[in-house]
Amino acid sequence: MNLNLRGFSQLVEDMSAALQSAASNLIDVSVGSVVRAIFEANASVTLWLQWLIVQVLAATRASTSTGSDLDSWMLDFGLIRLPAVFSTGIVTFSRFVNTMPATIPLGTTIKTADGSLTFSVTADESLSIWQTAISAYVLPSGVTSASVPVACTTSGSVGNVLAGTISVIAASLPGVDQVVNSAPLTDGANAESDQALRMRFQSYLSSRSLATLAAVENAIATVQQGLNVSIHENTAPNGSYFPGTFLVIADDGTGYPPSNLISDIATAVTWVRPVGTAFSVIPPIVLTVDVSLTAISASATVGSIGPAIQNAVAAYLNRLPIEAAASVTRVAQAAYQAGAGVLNITAIMLNGAPSDIPAPFGTVVKAGQITVTANVG
């Protein structure tokens, strides 16, 4: 619906013309006159009413409503905006003296150097130093450092900090002296945007009555933002041919999705799977790719270009879809995009070879050790 809106001056002119056409004598509507003041006051109120009408019209349609209005509109159809996601990653605690055991309790808080963001230590029962009985990681005597998982306490992309950003231990931690994140933290995402919610609503409606691949993909998309998923039809978890089944390989970006996320995905798929079929939801197998390269840089940037290239290459590798190969040329492209100071990239090696690294069935590539030799061009 197109509204015939009018501006302030047009409203005043229309009222003046209407008054003059109905009067037998010339009416003074010059600036400062009583009649002109009344017209301008009415025009101001009319503008406010026009604005209210535009707001109401926008809120009546999903294509134009925003924020909470869009949320309430979607809620009528049982669709909820996906919340923000907390960033996760690995930090390394270290100490100068290792003659005694040291404990890193679950929930230990650490911060960025400027103190603006706080991170909390999370549990990983697969690590040998994790002690379930005391809910803590224990560094045995003789061990100088240990790497443990953490999550940002503030949701959103703000938690995706660069390598070396986290360096402050904000809790009492006897026997532990330092902390640092050698790799960037990832996976933090802001709450679903209005446009993304509208796009998902279209997929949501088109899959309601269909037990199809699109319906399964839409169900998985409603679990959490930023999921990396690969679906194989007529396939068993080991990759063999198995009619009447399908396999879902899901990752949250870390390569090691928690068991509760796998369970949530399985529950969502259950509601839309075709009757008479079976399915499995499994995490991917992580293939770590080490990268070494030589960067030729301008003298003014040679000191900072190494970390920038490391972060850019790690971001490329960690964003690869499940079963996507790591490409030598894409690594070079990521390195060039690290900054204008990069003049040339040579001697690129992936896991010790100058060739692409294919990802086998069910495998996802993640960044390992990234070594950059920076020279002045």
Image (cartoon, rainbow, N blue to C red):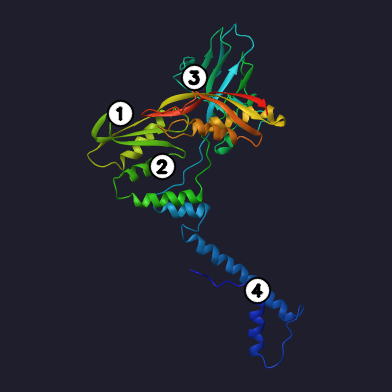
Report the residue marked by disc 4.
43
| Residue type, mark 1 in image | Gly
Q: CA distance from mark 2 to mark 1?
A: 23 Å
Q: Residue furthest right?
A: 32
Q: Earlier in the sequence, mark 4 or mark 3?
A: 4
Q: CA distance from mark 2 to mark 3?
A: 33 Å
Which residue is drawn at the image coordinates 54% and 67% (left, top)?
53
Q: CA distance from mark 4 to mark 3?
A: 68 Å
Q: Foreground mark, 4 or 2?
A: 2
Report the residue marked by disc 1.
239
Q: Give the image location of residue 277, x and y in percent.
A: 24, 38
Q: CA distance from mark 1 to mark 3?
A: 37 Å
Q: Earlier in the sequence, mark 1 or mark 3?
A: 3
Q: Earlier in the sequence, mark 1 or mark 4?
A: 4
Q: Earlier in the sequence, mark 2 or mark 3?
A: 3
Q: Foreground mark, 2 or 3?
A: 2
85 with respect to 95 (left or right): left
> In this rendering, is residue 222 above or below 100?
below
Q: Give the image location of residue 231, x and y in percent.
A: 34, 37
Q: CA distance from mark 4 to mark 2?
A: 49 Å
Report the residue marked by disc 2.
221
What SS does tag 1 mark?
loop
| Residue type, mark 2 in image | Ala
Q: Foreground mark, 4 or 3?
A: 4
| Residue type, mark 3 in image | Ser
What SS does tag 3 mark?
loop
Few, some or many residues within 10 Å of mark 2 (<14, 14–19, 20+): some
Report the residue marked by disc 3.
135
239 with respect to 347 (left or right): left
Q: Earlier in the sequence, mark 2 or mark 1?
A: 2
